[in-house]
Image: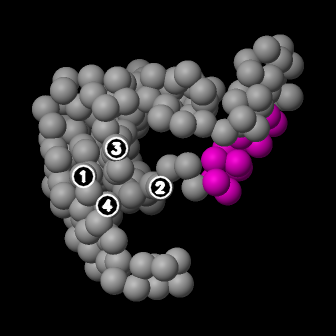
């Protein structure tokens, strides 16, 4: 595909910025990029420096980010996709217009439909590239008597672990 795009020998993507606590993930991603001909240099940064530089739009090329902030689709689109968002480097006028439309809409179903349309456009335009999915260990299944899911309000994982129990055979 790179050859068809005019890069038969691949290309240099320069720097790959990430929060230092996820540098191990960045190394794996760089290996995968290199396998298809995209060369980049990992730039792990201390967390405060990373988010400061990211919010001030100082990084170029590749930025690996994740957000654990509370919120819904609208709050994440506002921060990462729509014009003026803290971490937005560029935007699309059609998405910006839809975002403003859904923000002003008081009808829950129409607002939801508009957010789905925005998410579809994000997918079609390949605005972000998902590179991993968190896979925390949770106890759930036919052999589990107590999964411990929901025992700590608003905590999405099995906890406390000592309460996870298997059914007796």
Q: Can you tell which mark lies on residue 129? A: 2
Q: Position of residue 147 (x, y in %)?
A: 37, 43
Mark 3 touches mark 1? (CB < 8 Å): yes
The residue to which callout 4 is attached is: 13
Quick one: label 3, few (<14), some, or many (20+) residues within 10 Å? few
Mark 1 touches mark 4? (CB < 8 Å): yes
Q: Residue at x 76, y 29 (%)?
A: 97
The residue to which callout 3 is attached is: 60
| Span highlighted in magenta in the image | 112-125
Under tag 3, what secondary structure? loop
The residue to which callout 1 is attached is: 15
Quick one: label 4, few (<14), some, or many (20+) residues within 10 Å? some
Q: Is residue 93 above or below residue 17?
A: above
| Mark in front: 2 vs 1 | 1
* Residue at the front extreme of this rendering: 6
The one of 166 and 90 positioned closer to us in this rendering: 90
Q: Position of residue 53 (x, y in %)?
A: 27, 28
Give the main secondary structure of the magenta stretch. Answer: helix
Under tag 4, what secondary structure? strand
Judged left or right of residue 146, residue 19 is: left
Quick one: label 2, few (<14), some, or many (20+) residues within 10 Å? few
Q: Is residue 99 above or below residue 38?
A: above
- Real-space Cα distance between discs 1 and 4? 6 Å
Under tag 1, what secondary structure? strand
Q: Quadrant of residue 48?
A: top left
Q: Is residue 54 above or below residue 140?
A: above
| Mark in front: 2 vs 4 | 4
Q: Residue at x 45, y 59 (%)?
A: 142
Give the mark nearest the N terminus, 3 or 1.
1
Judged left or right of residue 61, residue 116 is: right
Mark 4 touches mark 3? (CB < 8 Å): no
């Amino acid at each position: 595909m790179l050859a068809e795009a005019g890069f038969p020998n691949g290309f240099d993507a320069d720097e790959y910025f990430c929060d230092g606590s996820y540098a191990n993930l960045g190394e794996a991603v760089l290996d995968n990029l290199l396998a298809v001909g995209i060369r980049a240099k990992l730039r792990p940064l201390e967390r405060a420096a990373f988010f400061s530089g990211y919010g001030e739009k100082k990084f170029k090329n590749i930025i690996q980010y994740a957000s654990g902030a509370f919120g819904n689709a609208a709050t994440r689109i506002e921060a990462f996709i729509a014009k003026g968002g803290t971490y937005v480097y560029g935007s699309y006028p059609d998405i910006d217009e839809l975002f403003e439309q859904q923000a002003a809409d008081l009808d829950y179903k129409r607002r939801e439909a508009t957010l789905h349309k925005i998410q579809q456009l994000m997918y079609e335009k390949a605005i972000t590239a998902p590179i991993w999915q968190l896979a925390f260990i949770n106890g759930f299944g036919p052999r589990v008597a107590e999964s411990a899911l929901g025992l700590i309000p608003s905590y999405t994982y099995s906890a406390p672990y000592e309460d996870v129990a298997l059914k007796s055979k």
